[in-house]
Image (cartoon, grey):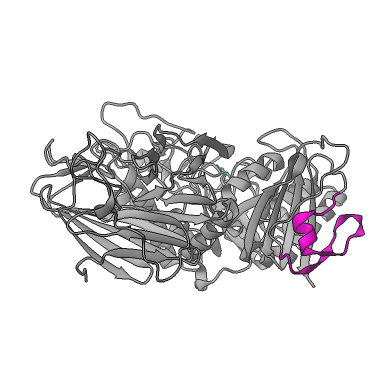
Amino acid sequence: MFQSQPEWIILHGSDVTAVIECSKNEAPLWRYWGMRLPDGLTPGSILRESRPEPSFSPHFDQPLTIFPGGGVGWFGAPALLAHRAGADWSFQATRCEVEQNVGSALIKLHDDVAKIELVASLSIKGNVLTLSTSLTNRGDGVLDVAWLASGVLPLPADARTVRSYSGRHNSEFVAVTDSLTRSMWRRENRRGLTSHDCFPGAIVEADGATFGAQLGWSGNHAQQIEWIDDGRYQWQMGEAFAPGEVRLASNESISTAEMLATCGADANEVAQNFHAAVRARIDWPGGKMRPRPVHLNTWEGFYFDHDEAALVDLADAAAVVGIERFVLDDGWFAGRDDDRSSLGDWWADSRKYPNGLLPLASHVVGLGMEFGLWVEPEMVNPDSALYHSHPDWALSVDGRPLLASRNQLVLDMQRPDVQEYLFEKIAALLRDLPISYLKWDHNRDIIAAGNRPAYRAQVHGGYALMARLRAAFPDVEIEACAGGGGRIDAGVVQHSHRFWTSDNIDAVSRAAIQRGFLQFMPPEIMGAHIGASPAHASGRSQSMAFRGGVALPGHFGVELDVRKLNDADRAELEWWISTYKQHRDRLHHGQVWMGEGNDGLLWQAHGTPHDVLLLIYRLDPQTQRHAPSLKLPMLDATARYRLTDAPFGHDETDGAWLIQHGLALPPMKAETVQIIRLTKI
Ligand code: DGJ
């Protein structure tokens, strides 16, 4: 139950602390969010009692609260923008109740004037603070909500830069660093799904601390960082609503997506904190992650050209090199010969598979591999049996053209008949075939989102279908894909087990994309394949060794026609597959550190400070005469290490030496990788 207010809300994680000051009849004030403060802390002063009134300022001082309102003396961006037919537009808590437990607080704000009730939820697990908001319309008329932040965080006055991520199909996680100034910084996505263009998260560098936040949401979103009058910044993040999208009837409520926030000494600590939080959100079959099986995905090797006999041969060849899961990608269903038709007709193409998919699936399973299948449930092609019988199932706006993208339209996931159809069709496949894996694609942005905008309903409809299928088939894993990395976020991760990181498998491009991914998501859910050379997306050719070394740390797979490899390449592929199997526990259970050495070297380390697998990448040619040594700050300065596969025959060295002086490296050619294991002796 909600109690009367305590004076302070202090939430500690292992290495982070949030301090909130409560006073009567108003929203609590944000005093501190950052690196851990001691237990038993007594904050220095009470802001409400001590802050002097600046000249020409309202007599009622309005510092940053956990949920700033509007029209009440707070001149920064409000966390809520709402009105009832133009009235009740100003929001200010008139009463506050707090329920505080260890590590969490529910803060209930009543605005008895605007008749709005709002619950801000804050809870810390490990080092991640999860924030969300629910709002109930307690007034008589409809409450029109334009903005409702999932969370509001303070950032310190010494916050300097923010790194966010831009991109496009084939080029996800393009890092963009902006300076924080007195101008508002804002990123917004209105593509209807998470998007390739605007990952819903960012990293802020301040003096002595790095902050990170991401939104667990697969739809439209916005975030903004705004300088405020006391020199700090406020960081708001939430779903972005279209006009008229959220209209709450009397006593109707809305709950937002969750914002995950953390802080650490550097970006690696932020990544590690996010990895722990995301790992805790994944619902693995059986409650525990199994070692991530090596994939063979048919897409780039076959595209739509499915020939059953060739795929049976491919399965044979895949099993020989050590593949553990065979994923039949797009092209298997009725009439699907290219990307112009058939989405929605989720039964096997009888020309390509005269006896259905069972013979191929059984063959795969008989070889000891799992069988996975590609679907794109939310979509329909106008040229499909589904569309011919239910043209009204596609989202549209009356009077506007139906804008296709990749020749497809989007099904209205709010409709119970659409949900039922998709569930029945996919459930039939899962019932009739030995399928243990679905690759769930979403290959277009959403434009016409219905006569009343249904962007968020669309996201919830997709989640509901995934949840229903998972409840009915709990052993089936799901891969979230949207033309590669268009739906990578901490929301869909609650229904899925792997992301397809990008359709660009070029290893140079991937090295950068994966670093962006790993800032927010753990490596075991990062789909990473050895593709063909030249790479289909870029046309660049790369050695198998480089492609293997870049794919190795993720959820490893192969996306080429294994039958066509020459003996040397096949042997090398086998070596990478067995190397992955040997290291996957180390790669996928521990911490990840990433850094840049001198002269363009990139490095990445996985494991623990006492047992790490180090991957050193050189993308561009060396510019120095002698290679620089590489400092390894994640090691234990008091330990001595055994080095496996290190250059110059080094087999033992002190941690302190490797931290301060660094590991001596020979020259490396462009597009090569070195992999070294360091274990404490
Ligand atoms: C986009 C995905 O990212 C690809 O891997 C592949 O599944 C295609 N869609 C199939 O249409």
Q: Is residue 246 above or below residue 4?
A: above
- The residue under the point 46% across, 54% down is 490
Extreme-right residue of the structure: 649
> Along the horizontal axis of the image, is 282 left or right of 65?
right
Looking at the image, can residue 556 be seen?
A: yes
Residue 257's x, y, as percent? 36, 53
- Image coordinates of residue 533 in percent, x first then y, are 76, 40
Q: Residue at x 39, y 29 (%)?
A: 403
User: Which residues make up the magenta segment?
Assistant: 636-665
Q: Nearer the viewer, residue 203 or 333?
A: 203
Q: Position of residue 68 (x, y in %)?
A: 27, 47
Along the line of sight, which residue is nearer the eye, 524 or 473?
524
Residue 662 belongs to magenta span: yes
**Quarter holding the C terminus?**
bottom right
Q: Is residue 329 visible?
A: no
- Residue 676 among those drawn in magenta: no
Q: Give the quadrant of ligand 1.
A: top right
24 or 294, nearer to the observer: 24
